[in-house]
């Protein structure tokens, strides 16, 4: 992956890593919808998402003993710069439950109290922050682990970068991505450009689903290759291949727009400029104890006791 922001100091001191790049949202949502709403903080407010997220992150830190960590949050669950490009992006999603929104600040504070570098932006999504960090620190680490449950981030996978759904214990490298999705990691963007993504309201090419898109990308490297040689599309062993070229031509603009929407930006504003900014040196014990107490989460205090304290 290109590294537009690499500095000479990055190349002189390469860390073994991996640098853990954590997409917080899937784990916050998973906790909110899987844990009972009866979990309350000291003031009687819902605390299930915050407690579940704290458990996830604390367990990851304990089990993985990382040297460097970044936790990225979504600053807005409804809008991003992609809505400027395509207003319908994520438009069909229901607004988050107020009980969940009320816990997002606590999740952010928990990540900070657990000693992690945290980042958030109102216009760029957590995916973009993760991708930007991956590119920026390309010369600083030997390996990277993208911790997420969002399949879109498989586009970042390469020989040095794994997709790691820690909560499920699933780790994917290039071969596993190819086996699971039928395309190479660098083709995930093209796959979404063709097939779209109903979850994010990315339209894709009408009438082209994942199976057809995968078959096309087995014969063509990317969208450019497909559209430069539409006449050969009829040779792809697919039902309806003879008319597929016309369908692709009709929706050419949508295909490229959809790929743009599905592509992780490498230009998200990220304050971390050095690997030292991302170094994990233990938890901020007073802050962590105060938060777990506020959340009515005494078990958390005991669980986090095994984590080292950050030096003063």
Image: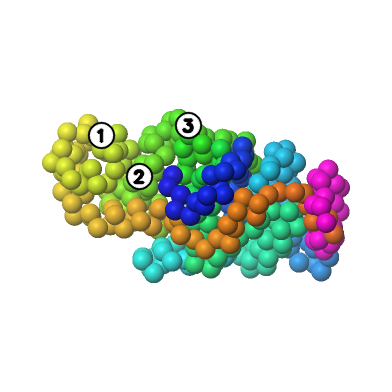
Observer-nearest of 308 and 98: 308
Label 2: state its secondary structure: helix
- Judge whether residue 297 is colored magenta: yes
Observer-nearest of 117 and 86: 117
In screen coordinates, is 25 left or right of 56? left
Q: Position of residue 141 (x, y in %)?
A: 57, 42
Residue that appears at 53% across and 56% down: 129
Label 1: state its secondary structure: helix
Label 3: state its secondary structure: helix
Q: Which residue is mark 2?
A: 191
Cβ atoms under marks 1 and 2 closer than 8 Å: no
First in sequence, mark 3 or 1: give its number. Answer: 3
Cβ atoms under marks 2 and 3 closer than 8 Å: no
Badge 3: how crowded within 10 Å, few (<14), some, or many (20+)? Answer: some
Quadrant hosting residue 59: top right
Q: Which residue is mark 3?
A: 176
């Amino acid at each position: 992956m290109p590294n537009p922001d690499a500095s000479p100091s990055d190349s002189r001191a390469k860390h073994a890593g991996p640098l853990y790049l954590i997409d917080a949202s899937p784990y916050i949502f998973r906790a909110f919808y899987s844990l009972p709403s009866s979990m309350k903080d000291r003031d009687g407010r819902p605390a299930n998402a915050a407690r579940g997220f704290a458990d996830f992150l604390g367990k990851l830190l304990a089990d993985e003993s990382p040297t460097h960590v970044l936790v990225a949050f979504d600053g807005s669950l409804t809008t991003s710069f992609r809505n400027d490009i395509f207003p319908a992006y994520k438009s069909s999603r229901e607004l988050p439950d107020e009980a969940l929104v009320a816990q997002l600040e606590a999740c952010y504070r928990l990540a900070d109290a657990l000693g992690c570098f945290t980042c958030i932006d109102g216009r760029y999504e957590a995916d973009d922050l993760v991708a930007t960090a991956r590119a920026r620190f390309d010369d600083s680490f030997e390996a990277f682990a993208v911790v997420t449950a969002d399949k879109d981030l498989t586009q970042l996978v390469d020989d040095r970068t794994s997709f790691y759904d820690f909560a499920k214990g699933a780790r994917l490298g290039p071969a596993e991505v190819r086996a699971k999705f039928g395309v190479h990691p660098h083709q995930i963007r093209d796959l979404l450009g063709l097939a779209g993504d109903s979850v994010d309201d990315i339209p894709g090419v009408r009438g082209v689903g994942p199976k057809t898109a995968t078959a096309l990308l087995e014969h063509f490297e990317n969208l450019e290759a497909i559209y430069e040689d539409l006449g050969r599309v009829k040779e792809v062993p697919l039902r309806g291949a003879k008319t597929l070229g016309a369908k692709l031509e009709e929706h050419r603009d949508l295909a490229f727009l959809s790929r743009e929407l599905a592509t992780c930006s490498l230009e998200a504003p990220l304050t971390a400029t050095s690997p030292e900014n991302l170094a994990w040196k233990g938890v901020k014990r007073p802050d962590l104890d105060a938060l777990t107490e506020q959340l009515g989460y005494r078990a958390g205090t005991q669980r986090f006791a095994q984590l080292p304290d950050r030096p003063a």
